[in-house]
Image: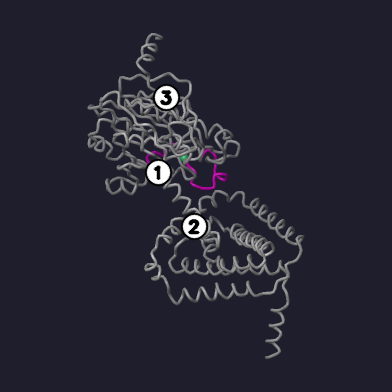
Amino acid sequence: MEKKINCVKAWFKRPLGVVFFNAIIALFTLVAYHKPLLDYVADNVEGSGVVIILSFALLILVFDFMFAMLFVRLMRMVGRVIIALSLVANAAALYFVNSYEVLLTRDVMGNLFNTRVSEASGFLSVDMFIYIVLLGILPALYVLCRKVEYGSWGSLAKSVGGSLLGIVLLAVVNINNVLWIDRNATKIGALIMPWSYIANTARHFHKQRMLNREEIRLPDAVFSSEEPSLMVLIIGESARSANFSLYGYERETNPLLKNDSVKIYTARASATSTTQAVKAILDHKRVKELYEILPNYMYRNGVDVVWRTANWGEPPLHIEKYRNVPRLRELYPDADGRYDGILVEGLREEIEMSTACKTLIIIHTSTSHGPTYNKKYPVEFERFAPVCNTVEMAKADRAELINAYDNTILYTDYLIHSVIEVLRGVDDRKCAMIYVSDHGESLGEGGVYMHGMVSASMAPKEQIEIPFIVWNGSDRELKELSEVGHYHTFHSVMDFLDMRSDFYNEEYSIFCAAACQSSQQSDL
Ligand SMILES: [Zn+2]
């Protein structure tokens, strides 16, 4: 017995090569903390999923090995202390994941930081103690106490180089799984230790900073008339003009709008991601900084502003009447909350209730957002069939994919038409409606799908050419313009509501000034 103990002692005292030492850390990290992640992948992957499960296991192994090599070899004991602390934190995180079935997402990390000590103490338990000792403190002691032979710089370079090569190979093998990974990224990211809580803590504080950003105020506005006016701005999602029959598409995707006397403009998006594009639609000019956006500016200047949304990604709003889908469901319990139709529910009453002289209603839709186009419209809008229902677009039948997408445009046609119908019934004020999409969409042209992969200047035209549709119920005339863009929205809304300010740029309004009105008439 004594011999055996001496044998173990001798083994423990013998220096371990740094590569082997870090391989043990990586393997332990994979085995001890990643069962929830591998279970999640196995439960949610389509088909057998052996490749994707193995890939995730290998990826975690390689990543952890590479980082352990860098930490231990470059920082020696400091690096080992950092790894030891991360093991204890991993154990606590795993306890929460297993016991409360929570994912360590950004919002959960945010809640954690907002929890008071008295509430947090309610989480303490014997189980938690066992987790932390067995899966945290004991392995941490091993990492701190084991004698390590740090080896040469060459072995570090080989290890890191080999790891990077392995990561590239795994990425190549999983090229067809990118969409699945993208769709599950939030959950997967919340289960990878220790990256989940580290990255999501950083994301939480970043979000807080973004939310608390002070916006730069624009100069106050004055109203040039007190004529009661109402503008409805509809922000589209991933709608590309090429699939609107109004823009020449051979399929009839706008059967209602074609009879609505709307005016269409050729338009280009200024970004291909929702967040950037929505900011551009609401900004008075191309700016990086956060200036007062359209709804906030209007509200501060006395306009009655309503924001109805089934989407997200807009800069912080400072208005009273914010209605997202859960709120709309409360207001209209009989409406079908699964589709964007709920955004126009009760619109007539909303307008009647607004007694302000100037009203702006913004509707932020989500209808054409992929990859599951076929889930974004009610069944009666499935006019183009069959439709694909896979999220793996690259494997989908392209004709079926386009059918599903075209049905979303058909539904959008109905939504815009419904708003126009409501506005036609408003007789106590002048009304207009602008529909503008945030960006377009790739549907397999050149092997590209969806949007947002590259900047607007490099994006394919399918992601940039967007519809800009106007219904004008006033006696103001609309300008003839060869092309418009996102930045036309702010000035056009301002102009329609008879608002003026130093920064107002008449060139960016789609409405004719009195002068242009008469010159356009004389041209005729
Ligand atoms: Zn978008």
Residue sitting at x 62%, y 52%: 174
> Disc 1 marks which amino acid?
Pro
Q: Which residues are magenta?
A: 377-399
* Label 2 environment density (alpha carbons within 10 Å; few <14, some 14–19, many ≥20): many
**Which residue, given by chain and number where applicable, does mark 1 sit on?**
316
Q: Is the stretch drawn in magenta largely helix, strand or loop?
A: loop
**Which residue, given by chain and number where applicable, does mark 2 sit on?**
201
Mark 2 or mark 1, which has the lower sequence index?
A: 2
- Magenta span has 173? no
Name the residue furthest bottom.
Answer: 1
**Is residue 474 visible in this depiction of the protein?**
yes
| Alpha carbons under labels 3 and 2: distance apart | 42 Å
Asked which quadrant contains residue 299, the reply is top left
> Disc 2 marks which amino acid?
Thr
Give SS at disc 1: loop
For the residue pair 175 and 501, the one nearer the viewer reads as 501
Q: Residue 500, percent across and down?
A: 35, 26
Q: Residue 245, percent across and down?
A: 45, 28
* Label 1 environment density (alpha carbons within 10 Å; few <14, some 14–19, many ≥20): some
User: Is residue 311 rendered to the left or right of residue 196?
Assistant: left
Rendered view: 357 above or below 476 = below
Q: Which image quarter holds the N terminus?
A: bottom right
Q: How is the image coloured?
A: one colour
> Disc 3 marks which amino acid?
Asn
Residue sitting at x 36%, y 47%: 338
Q: Which image quarter holds the C terminus?
A: top left
**Which residue, given by chain and number where applicable, does mark 3 sit on?**
505
Q: Are marks 3 and 1 in contact (CB under 8 Å)?
A: no
Give SS at disc 3: loop
* Label 3 environment density (alpha carbons within 10 Å; few <14, some 14–19, many ≥20): some
Give SS at disc 2: helix
Mark 3 or mark 1, which has the lower sequence index?
A: 1
